[in-house]
Image: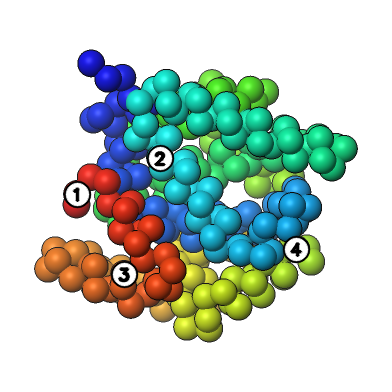
């Protein structure tokens, strides 16, 4: 019997098996990542400013693949990620701070929960613990240090990271300029509105996001569109053509 990295009945597979949920994970991560004090590392390679949407989306997509992979394949993929980052470190002659790795891991945990609760329902304590455990094992496989042992400890560590590791910088401004350039003004405006619905208060404040949330009233309508099987039409209208096939492939659970 095949053993998967995340159990077949895991809430994590439910979360990451829905394209719309993954898109909100991407939206939140794109906002917070732009504020991270270590974002200069991705500017070093030149890949992030050249294609910020594709670069960030591929990161989220890769995380989803690990969730659904057989355990040996997932562990091999995680080791590959660690090796790639070590190669970047050698090229720059410096070491990526361990807290920067944890920040990305913490984003995957936080936005997995926030996106699912926005679009579906509240998660119970055991389900949140399960989300934490899956991504804890990703971090452990990458050799990260000082990871919290459980979800409760992670909540405290997460707050410390939000306080210490985020700032509005020239990279933040440039990334949002690139987002708008690659998405166009209409889809960029929708991205920002989606970010407002899932980011924590610290991110909201640093980005100086407007308190007006015109997308929030649309969430119940979107849920209705899913019930009426019209959500595919909605996604088609909102997504750039280059990403539609990739997003469609995210619907792994067939829902």
Question: Looking at the rendered structure, which numbered label has been put on residue 65?
Answer: 2
Q: Secondary structure at mark 3?
A: helix
Foreground residue, 32 or 196? Answer: 32
Q: Which residue is mark 3?
A: 235
Is residue 152 something one can see in this rendering? Answer: no
**3D distance between C-alphas at marks 1 and 2:** 15 Å
**3D distance between C-alphas at marks 1 and 3:** 16 Å
Is residue 58 something one can see in this rendering? Answer: yes
Q: Secondary structure at mark 2?
A: helix
37 sits to left or right of 132 = right
Is 40 situated above or below 212? Answer: above
**3D distance between C-alphas at marks 4 and 3:** 29 Å
234 sits to left or right of 143 = left
The residue at the far top in this view is: 1
Sequence-first disc among 4 and 2: 2
Crowding near the residue tagged with mark 2, few <14, some 14–19, many ≥20 C-alpha atoms within 10 Å? some
Q: In which quadrant is the N terminus drawn?
A: top left
Question: Looking at the rendered structure, which numbered label has been put on residue 46?
Answer: none
Q: Position of residue 84 (x, y in %)?
A: 66, 36
Residue 220 placement: quadrant? bottom left
Q: Which residue is mark 4?
A: 171
Q: Position of residue 141 (x, y in %)?
A: 55, 23
Is 100 situated above or below 8? Answer: below
The residue shown at (49%, 61%) is 27
The residue shown at (49%, 66%) is 196
Q: Which residue is mark 1?
A: 254
């Amino acid at each position: 019997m095949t053993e998967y990295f995340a159990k077949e009945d895991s809430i994590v597979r439910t979360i990451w098996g829905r394209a719309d949920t993954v898109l909100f994970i991407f939206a939140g991560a794109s906002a917070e990542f732009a504020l991270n004090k270590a974002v200069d590392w991705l500017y070093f390679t030149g890949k992030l400013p050249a294609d910020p949407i594709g670069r960030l989306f591929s990161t989220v997509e890769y995380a989803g693949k690990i969730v659904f992979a057989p355990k040996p394949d997932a562990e091999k993929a995680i080791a590959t990620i660690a090796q790639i980052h070590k190669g970047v470190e050698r090229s720059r002659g410096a070491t990526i701070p361990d807290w920067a790795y944890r920040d990305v891991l913490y984003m995957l945990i936080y936005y997995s929960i926030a996106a699912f609760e926005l679009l579906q329902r509240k998660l119970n304590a055991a389900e949140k613990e399960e989300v934490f455990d899956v991504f804890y094992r990703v971090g452990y496989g990458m050799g990260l240090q000082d990871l919290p042992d459980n979800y409760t400890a992670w909540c405290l560590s997460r707050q410390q990271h939000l306080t210490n590791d985020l700032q509005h910088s020239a990279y933040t401004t440039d990334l949002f300029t690139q987002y708008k350039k690659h998405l166009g003004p209409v889809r960029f405006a929708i991205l920002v509105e989606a970010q407002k619905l899932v980011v924590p208060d610290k991110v909201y404040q640093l980005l100086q996001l407007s308190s007006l949330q015109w997308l929030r009233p649309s969430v119940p309508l979107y849920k209705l569109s899913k019930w009426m099987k019209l959500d595919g039409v909605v996604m088609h209208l909102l997504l750039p053509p280059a990403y539609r096939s990739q997003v469609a492939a995210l619907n792994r659970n067939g829902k």
